[in-house]
Amino acid sequence: MKRYPRDMSGYGPTPPAAQWPGGAKIAVQLVLNYEEGGENNILHGDAASEAFLSEIVGAAAWPGQRHWNMESIYEYGARAGFWRLHRMLKDLPITVYGVATALARAPEQLAAMKSAGWEIASHGLKWIEYKDASPEDEAADMAETIRLHTEVVGTPPRGWYTGRCSENTVRLAAETGQFAYVADSYADDLPYWMEFEARDQLIVPYTLDANDMRFATPQGFNAGDQFFSYLKDSFDTLYAEGGRMMSIGLHCRLIGRPGRAAALQRFIEYAQGHNGVWFATREAIADHWTQTHPHQRQNRPSGLSREAFTAAYGGIFEHSAWVAERAHRLELGPMHDTATGLHNALCRAFRSASPELRLGVLTAHPDLAGKLAAAKRLTAESTAEQASAGLDALTDDERTRFTALNDAYVQKHGFPFIIAVRDHSKASILAAFERRITHDRETEFAEACLQVERIAEFRLRDLLPR
């Protein structure tokens, strides 16, 4: 089976109602990344110095050497930046992404975090890149992270964010069974669930845009006003939409600088000036979402075997299981686990078939209010559809009219008149019948195929969400 693992649909056009506590319109979540003392450094057993997220934009790693300037920039975050931010934020619910080895080198800062009641989530063992790590090595580091974090903090972490992750990170974090949420995603404005074998893992997405890291990238903020303006615009949009989450990423060595800290203070005061704003830790958001929107597993079309898929959806196109069989061979994924997505896959299989095969689908449909209906030999779907338009309760005159139209239509076009009756009343069906019987065969063949697809859509919406 060709299966595509990424979910490009998510919640679609209608995200769930967040139901934030107190009827809040927005959940604002401040993350303080504590990485100072956990960065790449030969003193930490790394092969080279750090090269990422500092005032030295575009810095290169120095193999086998200490980088004194880089080290002192990180030290500023621990020595001065942290305390400036702690004074500013100590009365707010903050989530700390703590690198375990950095926390182990920061007993005073850790005590201040705990005194303020901040959530201390895990940011990994060391602040290093995992894209080339084996799953075994990454899992071992994750286990050591949990052990060291628990030893240093006193409690195990309930949240996880690697940052420089691999394609295995979220799965490995889920498999630990340790975390109320994993944050290694930037895919949504709301939490969402992922499934890994028997494990259901809540994802609370993070952000790289409303993030002070852009003070240290070539395309980014170069003044506090730019940061404030971006946060304000993000807040205003999400607040107007309602029921969204706004994540803000902070770093002690970046936003902790005096010329930037003032912008953060202005934004906090701006957000606090609105009603219906819930400042929350990521742990609180995860607990709320788990209670309010617990995960419910469902049979996913993209995960079914060919036999099961055909058994479930082979009748969507009337008596034409081959449509489902061909659709199953397409590149299906989470996007096709909804009515809209699966309808697209089935229609692709139908549209790409020969005219002869598509004609077979048309001729498999029964006449409207015809002999099969009278003999009660329609499929369950066709019976319900015709009944919904009142075609199971015709007067003698109406039945005579339908019979005459059916006979004339089939004689002219070679297939029965097909219409998605759920779009129509009995009167409008008759009007469409009389209009379409005048079409040439090519025009009517195309119209009948469109109606078959519309009928399939209705049938799928009876079975699947969206």
Image (spheres, rainbow, N blue to C red):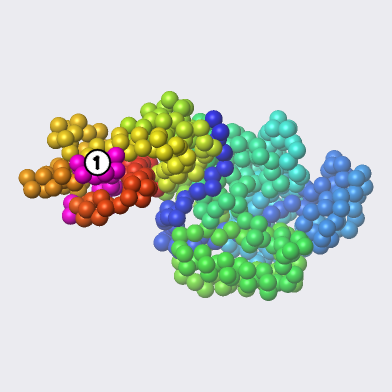
Residue 457 showing in the rendered view:
no
Q: Is residue 263 above or below residue 246?
A: below
Q: Is residue 83 left or right of residue 70?
A: left
Q: Nearer the viewer, residue 368 or 5?
A: 368
Q: Nearer the viewer, residue 63 or 343?
A: 343
Residue 213 in the image: state x and y as whole percent.
72, 60
Residue 136 showing in the rendered view:
yes
Disc 1 element:
helix
Residue 157 in the image: state x and y as whole percent.
61, 43
Q: Residue at x 35, y 34 (%)?
A: 360
Q: Quadrant of residue 155?
A: top right
Q: Amino acid at mark 1?
A: Gln
Q: Nearer the viewer, residue 121 or 394?
A: 394
Q: Is residue 74 above or below residue 183?
A: below
Q: Residue at x 39, y 38 (%)?
A: 358
Q: Quadrant of residue 221?
A: bottom right
Residue 272 in the image: state x and y as whole percent.
53, 70
Label 1 belongs to which residue? Answer: 411
Q: Was residue 419 drawn as part of the magenta stretch in this picture? A: yes
- The furthest residue to the left: 396
Magenta stretch in the rendered image: 406-427
Residue 261 in the image: state x and y as whole percent.
70, 69
Q: Residue at x 16, y 32 (%)?
A: 376
